[in-house]
Amino acid sequence: MDPLWTDAHAPDIEAFPQSDVRESLERAATEPMNLLLHGPPGAGKTAAVRALARRTHADPEADLVELNVDDFFSMTKKEVSQDPRFEHFISNKRRRESSKADLINHVLKETAGNTPVSGSYKTVLLDNAETVREDFQQALRRVMERYHESTQFVIATRQPAKLIAPIRSRCLSVPVRAPTEDETVGVLRDIADAEDVPHDETGLGYVATYAEGNLRKAVLGAQTVAVEEGSIEGMGVLEPLSDVGVGDRVESMLDDAEAGEFSDARSELDDLLVEEGLSGAELLDEILDAGRSRYDGERLARLHRLAGDIDFEMAGGTDERVHLSHLLAELGA
């Protein structure tokens, strides 16, 4: 299987299409500091942190620690203690006697307190940080204060307002806006040249329009077109792009929910929110699209009522994952 272009062509700092992001990363590379990267899905937040780590650490594999906060803080106590990333510094006694909160605090301290491998400091990325409860945020603030000399904390989020003020004040704010269509075309052109894939401006422009500012979606879409068509040219990109999406996965998630397989449905939900980078609103739209082909009459009306309630709750800034999980549970019921 060919490697994903998002991995094979992970950008270095100077290759980022957004000039303001490049400037902020260059500053952070010469003057290490805590960072708060915020912006929409697919804009390049995680890629920016990895580019910074490659620039500043002789051994980025060892000195960049990535924690998907949405996943980490939602783990059970047992899952945290058995995770291969953490189990080596969690004793049996601590497993038995610690609460989940204490165990998570211990993991944060150990992760931040480990000695850097290749330099004077290491980088800890906390991705999707908008889902962290306030009590855990307070614990994170204390860890940031204690280990600020040896650990650079980088917090990536789509909703910076959900972070408590003491955390925001300890970080340089780096807005990561969605790239423009022209910037996206430039990235795709460079990748197509590197892969020796025939392309033209019309084909690249269609892919950029399809991605709607989501650079990850644009790159993966371009790769799909190249594999299926052998080129990224003209209107030939339209049919392959029409087949790209998450529709099948949403259908599978709804199948699991209706069958009462809630764990499987919740797992797919997590993947769509985290791995695919969909926002709660985007995923809700996908569920409604799927529902219109699955249901009719009262069942369809009920789905729309549920979706209206969920949309209202998410607009209030509460946890998207919790509310979408509720929607799945209601469909199962």
Image (spheres, grey):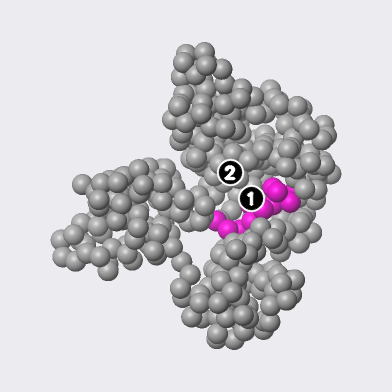
Circle 2: element type: strand
Front-most of 109 and 280? 109
Residue 71: percent from the left, percent from the top?
50, 40
Q: Is residue 236 above or below residue 295?
A: below
Amino acid type indicated by mark 1: Thr
At a point 75% along the width and 27% down the height, the residue shown is 115
At a point 65% along the width and 29% down the height, the residue shown is 111
User: Distance between the Cα atoms at labels 2 and 1?
Assistant: 7 Å
Residue 147 placement, left or right of 260: right
Residue 50 colored in magenta in the image: yes
Q: Is residue 326 above or below residue 113?
A: below
Residue 40 shows in the view: yes
**Residue 192 is drawn in which quadrant?**
bottom right
Amino acid type indicated by mark 2: Asp
Residue 264 colored in magenta in the image: no
Front-most of 84 and 267? 84
Residue 209: percent from the left, percent from the top?
56, 74
Question: How would you rate the neighbour count of disc 2 (Cα within 10 Å): few for under 14, some for 14-19, many for 20 or more?
Answer: many
Contact, mark 2 vs mark 1 (Cβ under 8 Å): yes
Task: Tell me the residue that label 1 is attached to.
Answer: 46
Residue 218 shows in the view: no
**Residue 112 is drawn in which quadrant?**
top right
Task: Tell me the residue that label 2 is attached to.
Answer: 127
- Of labels 2 and 1, earlier in sequence is 1
Q: Is residue 178 above or below residue 161?
A: below
Circle 1: element type: helix
Tell me where the magenta segment starts and ends, as one range: 41-52
Residue 200 placement, left or right of 224: right
Q: Main secondary structure of the magenta part?
A: helix
